[in-house]
Amino acid sequence: MTARNSQVQPLPPWLAWPIRVLAVIFVVPFRLAWDALVWLTRALWKYVGSPLTEYVLAPFFYYVIWVPLRWIAIYILWRPLAWITVHILWRPLVWFAKHVLAPLWDGFVWLLKATAPFWHLLARILLEVGKAVGWAMTMLYRYLLTPIGRAIAFVWRWVVIPIGQAIAWAWNHSVVLLWRYLVVIPVAFVWRYCVVPPARWVHTWVLRPIADTTRRVLATLGLR
């Protein structure tokens, strides 16, 4: 599509003039009415609304609402709360801190200073006791616990383990062999060659024929 074809084609004159006349008849009065309404609104605000707001509503809200609320907040809420905070809470706390806590703190500091030699002596005694306990623990670990542990490890490695290995070897080559060759193998031999063939023969030539005969008799009697 070319640029010429894409442009909107104007209406023919015989149709454009009636539309313009109708627009003048119906649109122009509404536009004039709207402009008149805008002018009237601006005039009312300029000569009525603005003076009313500036000289009536603003003073009314300021002197009738804001000033009483501010006075109530200051003289009924804030000042009583401030007086209560200062005279009932803060001053008793200051008096308590000055006449109770401060003397107690001064006495505690004086007691610490007066007993400072005792605390220094106690700290040195505790330090020496700690050193003595540490030395005793070191000596105990070095000359008692370490030799005992090494002796236990030596006995475990060169006595307990060899004895256990010897007992295991003797058990495997005595009791286990005797149990295998005197109990397990004979029982398996007897079971395989003395028990299984007779049991198989009885099952094949006795129990199975009896079972077959029983089924036939029951089938003949109509019970099966």
Image (cartoon, rainbow, N blue to C red):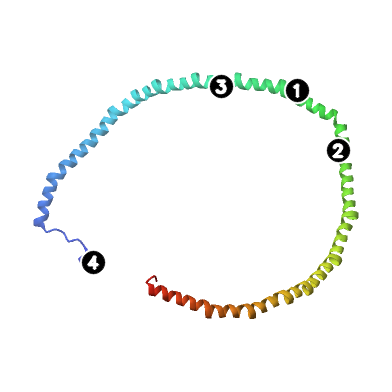
Label 1 – label 2 distance at C-alpha: 28 Å
Q: Quadrant of residue 125?
A: top right
Could you say which is closer to the camera, residue 5 or residue 196? 196
Q: Give me the disc on residue 221.
A: none
- Looking at marks 1 and 2 on the same chain, the residue that comes earlier in the sequence is marked by 1
**At 87% from the left edge and 36% from the top edge, which residue is drawn?**
122
Q: Give me the disc on residue 123.
A: 2
Q: Give me the disc on residue 103.
A: 1
The residue that label 3 is drawn on is: 82
- Secondary structure found at label 2: helix
- Looking at marks 2 and 4 on the same chain, the residue that comes earlier in the sequence is marked by 4
- Looking at marks 4 and 1 on the same chain, the residue that comes earlier in the sequence is marked by 4
Residue 97, x across and y down, in percent: 69, 23
Q: Amino acid at mark 2?
A: Ala
User: As drawn, is 207 to the left or to the right of 19?
Assistant: right
Task: Tell me the mark number nearer the camera, choosing from 3 and 2.
Answer: 2
Quarter of the picture holding the N terminus: bottom left
Residue 108, x across and y down, in percent: 78, 27
- Looking at marks 4 and 3 on the same chain, the residue that comes earlier in the sequence is marked by 4
Answer yes or no: do the residues labelled 2 and 4 have beta carbons within 8 Å?
A: no
- Secondary structure found at label 3: helix
As displayed, is residue 72 above or below residue 178?
above
As displayed, is residue 121 above or below residue 155?
above
Quarter of the picture holding the C terminus: bottom left
Answer yes or no: do the residues labelled 4 and 3 have beta carbons within 8 Å?
A: no
